[in-house]
């Protein structure tokens, strides 16, 4: 008898299945990210029931998001990031307000309550860190201005996500000004702490033991996850902690080696994340949420790129950069799933609203992946030129 709760069996299902579907996807020029989600839907609780605990896979997959941001931070010099982030602050704030209003308006039209409309709108104001960054080329775009602008917008959204999560917890446990003050001071405090540790602890250790590759690998992982956990303890998102951990090491001469050595580990966890997205969706709600999800998805896929393009142009970005960043950020986010799930768990919204957000997120993931893959350079492009432009 097969024990489907065993980690070994779960790994077998996920990676043997993705190997098969990824091969088919590549031959038919489909997005690999879509293949991962399709496999999750086929093997999850509403498919073949081979993996019945998608929550476990989701938690493992979230580690992949942390590694993704850690690696991106390793490619960004702190002075360049601060300059770019200061420019996009208003882009993040204004665009988020617009997307909240869109989600709220569509939700109210379909007879959701006002509080559900607010939560749905708030959950859909974010763009996907995974899709946005995973589909960046692995050659030179990391070091170009386009990548810096997109990362800065995503980092601004991470900060806003921390605020939204704080409000959700506050609505359940009673709003606390102490907690709010902690979040306000914790971000700069975490940044200062990270650079102090890098300067006086990590850099001397890397310098002394740089010939022992296994030690460098272990110390890098420990630093990434440790700062992520500290960020979560301070009321911030773990993703912000991972990103700061990477930026703190960006000036180190060993940063590029760390980035290359951790890429396979990042991809391992990200496959599991996208599998969990497909496996976790309850198809019993599909008939109820399909129409509003399609309307929300079409609206976001059209409006998000236009809003980002307009706002980025207003702060002086070129038309080419603005258009590309807008399309690469034209979907919902993994934060959308988290916000809706937490709100449903706190009974702030109902299950229908929760699965509306999930359905909208999945649809925008799929469609946006295709738009990006066929429009711009990505690691999975079908031509050498599109991979390296």
Image (spheres, rainbow, N blue to C red):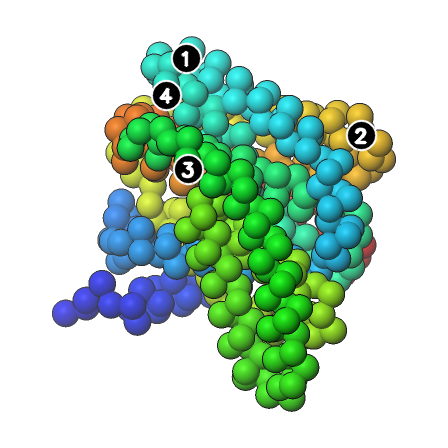
Q: Position of residue 63 (x, y in %)?
A: 45, 59
Label 1, label 2: how many angstroms apart (C-alpha)?
Answer: 33 Å
Q: Earlier in the sequence, mark 1 or mark 4?
A: 1
Report the front residue among 363 and 190: 190
Q: Is 49 displayed left or right of 324 in the figure? A: left
Label 3, label 1: how many angstroms apart (C-alpha)?
Answer: 31 Å
Closest to the camera, between mark 3 and mark 4, is 3
Q: Earlier in the sequence, mark 3 or mark 4?
A: 4
Closest to the camera, between mark 1 and mark 4, is 4
Q: Position of residue 6 (x, y in %)?
A: 24, 68
Outermost residue to the bottom: 211
| Count of numbered circles on the image | 4
Image mark for residue 179: 3
Q: Is residue 222 above or below residue 36?
A: below
Q: Is residue 354 visible?
A: no
Image mark for residue 108: 1
Closest to the camera, between mark 4 and mark 2, is 2
Residue shown at 35% from the left, 69% from the top: 12
Quadrant including the C terminus:
bottom right
Q: Earlier in the sequence, mark 3 or mark 2?
A: 3
Q: Position of residue 308 (x, y in %)?
A: 69, 30
Structural crowding at the residue carrying mark 1, measured as other residues with C-alpha within 10 Å and reported as few (<14), some (14–19) or many (≥20): some
Label 3, label 2: how many angstroms apart (C-alpha)?
Answer: 33 Å
Label 3, label 4: how many angstroms apart (C-alpha)?
Answer: 24 Å
Report the front residue among 193 and 227: 193
Reading the image, the residue beneath label 4 is 116
Residues tagged 4 and 2 counted as in contact (Cβ below 8 A): no
Image mark for residue 315: 2
Q: Position of residue 289 (x, y in %)?
A: 36, 25
């Amino acid at each position: 008898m097969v024990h489907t709760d065993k980690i070994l069996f779960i790994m077998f299902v996920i990676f043997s299945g993705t190997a098969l579907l990824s091969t088919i996807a590549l031959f038919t020029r489909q997005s690999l990210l879509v293949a991962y989600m399709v496999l999750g839907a086929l093997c999850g609780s509403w498919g073949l029931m081979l993996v019945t605990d998608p929550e476990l896979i989701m938690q493992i997959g979230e580690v992949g998001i942390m590694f993704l941001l850690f690696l991106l931070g390793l490619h960004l010099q702190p002075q360049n990031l601060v300059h770019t982030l200061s420019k996009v602050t208003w882009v993040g704030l204004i665009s988020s307000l617009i997307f909240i209003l869109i989600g709220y308006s569509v939700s109210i039209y379909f007879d959701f309550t006002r509080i559900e409309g607010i939560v749905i709108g708030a959950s859909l104001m974010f763009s996907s860190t995974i899709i946005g960054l995973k589909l960046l080329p692995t050659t030179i775009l990391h070091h170009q201005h386009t990548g810096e602008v997109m990362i800065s917008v995503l980092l601004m959204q991470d900060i806003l996500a921390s605020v939204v999560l704080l409000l959700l917890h506050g609505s359940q446990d009673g709003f606390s000004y102490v907690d709010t003050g902690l979040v306000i001071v914790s971000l700069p405090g975490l940044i200062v702490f990270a650079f102090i540790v890098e300067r006086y602890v990590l850099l001397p250790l890397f310098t002394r033991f740089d010939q022992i590759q296994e030690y460098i690998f272990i110390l890098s992982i420990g630093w990434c996850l440790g700062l992520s956990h500290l960020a979560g303890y301070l009321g911030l998102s773990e993703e912000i902690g991972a990103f700061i951990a990477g930026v703190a090491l960006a000036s180190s001469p060993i940063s590029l080696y760390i980035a290359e050595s951790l890429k396979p580990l990042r991809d391992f966890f990200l496959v599991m994340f996208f599998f969990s997205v497909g496996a976790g969706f309850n198809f019993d709600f599909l008939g109820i949420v399909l129409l509003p999800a399609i309307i929300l998805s079409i609206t976001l896929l059209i409006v998000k790129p236009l809003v980002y393009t307009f706002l980025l142009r207003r702060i002086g970005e070129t038309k080419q950069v603005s258009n590309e960043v807008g399309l690469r950020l034209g979907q919902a986010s993994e934060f959308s799933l988290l916000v809706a799930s937490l709100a449903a768990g706190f009974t702030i919204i109902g299950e229908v609203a929760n699965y509306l957000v999930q359905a909208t997120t999945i649809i925008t993931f799929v469609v946006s992946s295709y738009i990006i893959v066929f429009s711009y350079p990505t690691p999975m492009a079908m031509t050498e030129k599109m991979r390296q432009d």
